[in-house]
Amino acid sequence: MPKRLASTATLALEDGAGETQPRRAAVLLPLPLAGAYDYLVPEGLEVEPGSVVTVPLGQRELFGVVWDLLPDDGRAASDGGGGKVLPLERLRPVIGTCPVPPLTAVARRFLAWVSDYTLAAPGAVLRMALSSPSALEPPRPVTLYRRAERPLPSELRLTPARRRVLEEMAESPARPLAEIAAAAAVGTSVVKGLEKAGVVEAVSVLREARFAAPDPERSGPALSDSQSAAAAALRQTIAADAFSVTLLDGVTGSGKTEVYFEALAAALATGRQALVLLPEIALSAQWLERFEARFGVAPALWHSDLTSAQRRATWRAVAYGNAPVVVGARSALFLPFPDLGLIVVDEEHESAFKQEDGVPYHARDMAVVRAQLGGIPAILASATPSLETLNNVKAGRYAELSLPERHGGARLPEISLVDLRSDKPPRLETPGGGQAWLSTALRAAIAETLDAGEQVLLFLNRRGYAPLTLCRACGHRLQCPNCTAWLVEHRLAGRLQCHHCGFSGRLPRNCPECGSEGSLVACGPGVERLAEETRVLFPEARSGLMTSDTLTGPDAAADMVRAVQQHEIDLLIGTQIVAKGHHFPQLTLVGVVDADLGLFGGDLRAAERTYQLLHQVAGRAGRAERPGRVLLQTSEPEHPVMQALAGGGRDAFLAAESEARREAGLPPFGRLAAVILSSPDPGQVDAVAAALARSAPRQPGLTVLGPAPAPLAVLRGRHRRRFLVKASRGFRLQAALLPWIQAIKPPSNLRLQVDIDPYSFL
Ligand code: ADP
Ligand code: ZN
Ligand code: ZN
């Protein structure tokens, strides 16, 4: 375990009379196990807390951030040096500063806070903030072209193309070659020719990326009364210029986005930056179109699919205040905003905001922390807020604004249950035995909808063709060689895949266990298999498949969304990625093929998540004039989740779910942490787990459960054991965990991960 930072406070010394410049700097390095290390600030080098510097480490040169500056009074600035305080003359000097603004005090306090909360090493958290190392290097010069200041030589042959270029360049500042050529509708060689002739000159300049400023004055749509009231309340939080959290709780289609756009406009009008976190940026094409329609320009984007050049440009633009609005995935929280004035977390209940690997953190929770440290408002938007957030509203910590109706009189869809125990899907009349998953009731509803010229969405949260492949002769099940998981058949790709480690192989002809030929059969449905069934039942319908396998990249997703919007598709089949935020006006029927999927399994939030996901999916139906309906196929029609969905009784469901959590002492009424050990060697992981069990903290208010093999007992070839730590709400969990896990010195191939507030129990 890493050393903690000695002090997260900034000890900037005053440069008073007689005092010398502090020469000892604690520099935090973006390494997974590092705290800060002491370095010498050479005479003449100006650094301040937050400065990004290069320092030597062993044979390497690394970027780091000056965390503290201390006078040389024999104390170490950091405690990363193993407790020894090296005298100044033995310290290695800082090599230089990077040409970027220093990280602000708020940004540094945020990194330290995240590190303290997650128990991840400060260096691991810093690494998320310095996620684009090339952004720390000086900007590269670009070559621009402009009209040279001299008259046209008489011998210059003025072709029409050359004339256009010269006209184009007459009054304008230096511009890139390609831009001039495009504007004058000529090839770049024409411009180059003019350069040779001496009438155009190339200049080399350093240019910082800059995102065009959204125009807060542009007016949005006329808001309804309830929308206006909510927008006014949000603008009030901006005017208050202080920390606040507001839940914007509105049914799907109520106009939450339009309403928080008003808050964005208000924040932009004050000249500060704004950050919007979305759970899945790749699926947000419609959101981006609306932003552009509202503000006239595109926002800066931040997500994992950016090229490194885009990352570099965006990171620098944010750092220099040249990106007024950033829309990003959770990691955007760690961008170096100099003057952030508002954070919006849309779909705040989404589990995609929880980062599972590296430093496990929940972006919604950390967004609230970032807002608090910065003294700014945060807005959490959802149609199905998390119990955590609702509990904070109830306790008076968060304000709440409600939008109870869909915009423009669109009605919420009518949701009914199909009991699969009595309405068993009839077999298909096809050669292969014809297993089917659509009940008579759902088939009839699909046929009616298609006949009416409207669109259908069938939702099944299972990628691929079949979740399991089984040998009919010996019962063998095809399993991932690296994980405790079945292989999923992806028939379109002709592969078997493990959804946990990415293993992929061909479907064998013979059973690998007993050698029988042609004995392997697909069990259960995936979306590909469902598509096969709909092709048999509705051969005329144009169908489309929307899963992470078919939509690779943001463009494919945007194309698919457009195709559905333009009604080039009648029947859409999709996994959870169709659930999120899309607005399909002609879609009037949603069929949930297996509503029970996800209801069971060892996840404390299973019911809540199922409710949220199905509610979200249901919200895709009937978003315009035509009313929508939703059919949920379930074998558990009495389950509180199904009852709440069908009866619209969200409050009753939440009350029951809250009560169950409160009684069990589970979040949000109690605290949880997971400690996960993994190693390629099962003996080793068991030995370390046993040692940890012996030294587990014993304190009133704290229970340590485990170790137990994780449900995913082997993942990527590593054997996994879990502890679950339960504590009462006010308990200082981190303080109890830290000495426990720091006391063990794990062997090098054993990994110990602490997950505070776990969302995954696999
Ligand atoms: P939510 O985020 O609550 O699901 P949206 O903000 O996406 O709702 O709004 C749903 C649809 O209604 C969108 O197409 C949006 O443009 C439209 N809409 C919402 N409010 C208005 C309004 N005041 N005027 C015009 N269109 C609106
Ligand atoms: Zn077999
Ligand atoms: Zn696997």
Image (cartoon, helix red, strand yellow):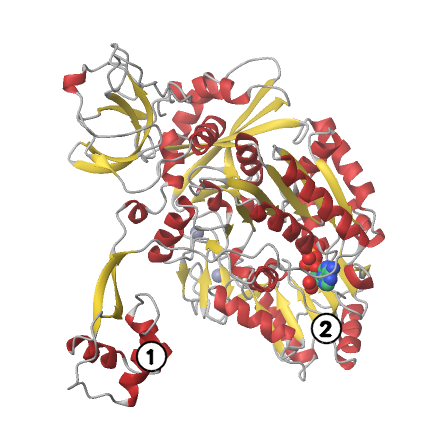
At 24% from the left edge and 10% from the top edge, which residue is drawn? 74
The image position of residue 150, as x and y in percent, is 20, 72
Q: Position of residue 270 (x, y in %)?
A: 57, 44
Dot 2: within a 10 Å radius of its alpha carbon, few (fewer than 14), some, or many (20 or more) residues?
Answer: many
Indicate whether 303 appears above or below 31: below
**In the image, residue 327 above or below residue 662:** below
Residue shown at 68% from the left, 69% from the top: 436
Under tag 2, what secondary structure?
A: loop
- 680 or 242: which is nearer to us? 242
Q: Which residue lies at the image location 39% right of the left edge and 48% below the top edge?
A: 315
**Image quarter for ligand 1:** bottom right
State which quarter of the image contains the N terminus: top left
> Which disc number belongs to residue 586?
2
Q: Which mark is residue 496?
A: none
Side (left or right) of 629 relative to 706:
right
Would residue 691 appear left or right of 326 to someone viewing this image? Answer: left
Where on the picture, by quarter, is residue 89?
top left
Outermost residue, top side = 73
Between 650 and 477, the one nearer to me in the picture: 650
Residue 639 appears anywhere in the view = yes
Check disc 1 and report the residue beneath it: 167
Indicate yes or no: mark 2 CB to ligand 1 under 8 Å.
no
Give the quarter of the image for residue 398: top right
Q: Is residue 698 above or below residue 10?
A: above
